[in-house]
Amino acid sequence: MAEIKKLISGLTISLALFSIIVGGKVFAQVPPPCSLLYEQNQQLIKRYDLNGDFFISPSEESKAISDWLAGKISDSEVLVIIKFSRFECRIPRPTPVPSTITVISPNGGETWEIGKTYEIKWVAENVNYVGIELIVGEREAGWLIARRVPASQGTYTWTVPSFIPPGNNYRIKISNAEALFPSDVSDNYFSIVKPVVCSHQAPTLNIFPLSQTGFPGQLLIYRVYLSNLDSKECDPVRFELKAECPENWRCEISPELISVPPTQLGLATLRVGSLSNTPAGAYQISVTATHGADPSLFSRATATYVVSQREDPVSGTLSVDKTFAKVGEEITLTITAKDLNGVDRVMAYYHGKWNSQ
């Protein structure tokens, strides 16, 4: 073994033909192409590229020989390292993968309101971290929004601060936070505007018709019209509708919750039925609409249900144009009928049967 160590330490290689002594034997070796040598032994060669400079230096070769003498690597492995070093082979450098950043939103045409929160979105490849800026016009730099955001996150939640002046020439710039490139900006300008103030108002409420007449136990239908008087900057509001009728009456409003946009009109249906033994008279019914965004805002409207008692029997008269007629001669009968409940039809009995008019 001492002889082998001595021989190895004094090893010389010819670039065309070289000999290597392993275990006391001499082997003639023709150098293979570097590319093939690397392809077949990538992990081993990379392990001994201790400096990371893509080739095996004399000191790195010596480290491989020391490991071989210590039994840490095999004969064939030390031969690979010696060949790669002595023939000045190079480890192929990795092909650079292009890095890209693309702004998705805002990308032009949007309107963002000061004080509201929005999502800044992008797509990045082979970038670790990004920085986000708000730029004005054609400037290259602007207000820093975020300095270091994981690129893979793809989105950043931003509340437009109050110190940003309103304008229509803003763009978002997203850059590689670890290098000068790549970067991207919004394709077109977007706008930042002042906060929009929403003004809530109590709704207006109307019941139609204002008065109806029905008999005891009769179901009457009313229409309820609700106007949302909120300013147009407000969101649609859900109003709660509640109907009130005399005790134990049927009293149904539909829908009970109605969503109405600002300055628009909503419609509901109110069904009211009196009791079968309700005395004649005028009875008040009402509907209350409460603002969903501010319960202190409400409106109330009223209508009247007039209960009228049925009158029986039907009254009427019958007259003829003559008191005597010959056989075959026509007689004209005049019938008048009166019913407070309404006349549907009149029937007369002649020729042995009832006839309807």
Image: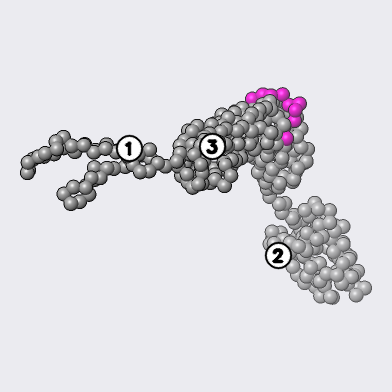
Cα–Cα gap, marks 2 and 1: 115 Å
Screen quadrant of the C terminus: top left
**What residue sits right under mark 1 in the picture?**
338
Q: Amino acid at mark 1?
A: Lys
Work out whether mark 3 precedes mark 2 in sequence or the reverse, and give the earlier one: 2
Foreground label between 3 and 2: 3
Residue 283's tag is 3
Q: Image height check: is 30 above or below 324? A: below
Cα–Cα gap, marks 3 and 2: 101 Å
| Residue 193 spot, x, y in % from top left | 66, 26
Magenta-colored span: 159-170
Foreground label between 2 and 1: 1
Where on the picture, by quarter, is residue 7? bottom right
**What residue sits right under mark 2 in the picture?**
40
Judge by depth and name the residue closer to the eye, 305 or 156. 305
| Residue 140 spot, x, y in % from top left | 71, 28
Where on the picture, by quarter, is residue 197? top right
